[in-house]
Image: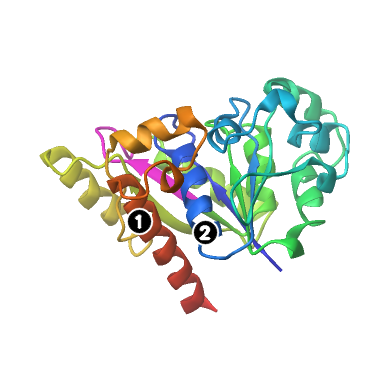
Amino acid sequence: MGKVVAVFNQKGGVGKTTTNVNLSACIAESGKKVCVIDIDPQGNTTSGLGVDKNSVEYTIYDVMIDEVDIRDSIVTTEYENLALIASSVQLAGAEIEITEMENRELRLKEAINKIKEDYDYIFIDCPPSLGLLTINSLSAVDSVLIPIQCEYYALEGVSQLMNTIQLVKRNLNPNLEVQGVILSMFDGRTNLSIQVVDEVKNYFRGKVYTTIIPRNVRLAEAPSHGQPVIYYDKKSKGAIAYTELAEEFLDLEEDVI
């Protein structure tokens, strides 16, 4: 049975999609079977993995709204062991459509249960909001990865984020846990980045990954080429950092087992 993980922060611009694309690609490269579900209407994970949204027959929208079999929506990417269920611009209106549906908070979970055994890990890229798409994601997963940028106001909104996780845990998904916190956009030349690291470690005691993702030009360039950074420039600081994060992620998973 595979593990389902949401990459979630309701703040935009924190490295959520960057983490989803690159961590999943590094874990897939290590030999694990990975599927990424892009439930963010912006669809940046879909394009970041080199998939043209307009060329996909069925997206996660079709699965959740029209009850298309989730297996029919799986796209094979050009990267070994890495599959994708693409986003659609129609997701922007999906929250309104889902509102009147039966089991509206659990539609994604019911779909994912059909493919859970086919993968070692399923990662969900959530939208930067606290709406029904995010509630569906948090209801469907075993754990949450929280990317936080090493910038001023980094912890702003985190208490609201944690309240949402606790609310879902209490009412919809009793097994939901915080898998870990990933510090991104770190600039070692600034005191601010160093202060933020200390603040976040204080807030999330024992949950922050040792590997910190630096600001990196190659990491920023890779999405425009539709490639995870390990394929765009394997020797870049960004690629090395995500490779190390994937190793740390998997090592901690083995410790739990």
Over which residues does the magenta segment extend? 145-155
Q: In this picture, is 5 found above or below 127?
A: below
Q: Using the numbered discs, state the Cα–Cα distance from disc 2 to disc 1 in whole angstroms.
A: 29 Å
Quadrant location of residue 12?
Answer: top left
Which residue is under mark 1? Answer: 204
Residue mark closest to the camera, 2 vs 1: 2
Q: In this picture, is 238 found above or below 180?
A: above
Q: Position of residue 144 (x, y in %)?
A: 53, 53
Instruction: Name the disc covering residue 50, or none.
Output: none
Q: In this picture, is 230 found above or below 127?
A: below
Which residue is under mark 2? Answer: 29
Quadrant location of residue 135?
Answer: top right
| Residue 226 included in the magenta stretch of the image | no
Mark 2–mark 1 CB contact (< 8 Å): no
Q: Position of residue 103 (x, y in %)?
A: 83, 42
Ranked by sequence position, the earlier of labels 2 and 1 is 2
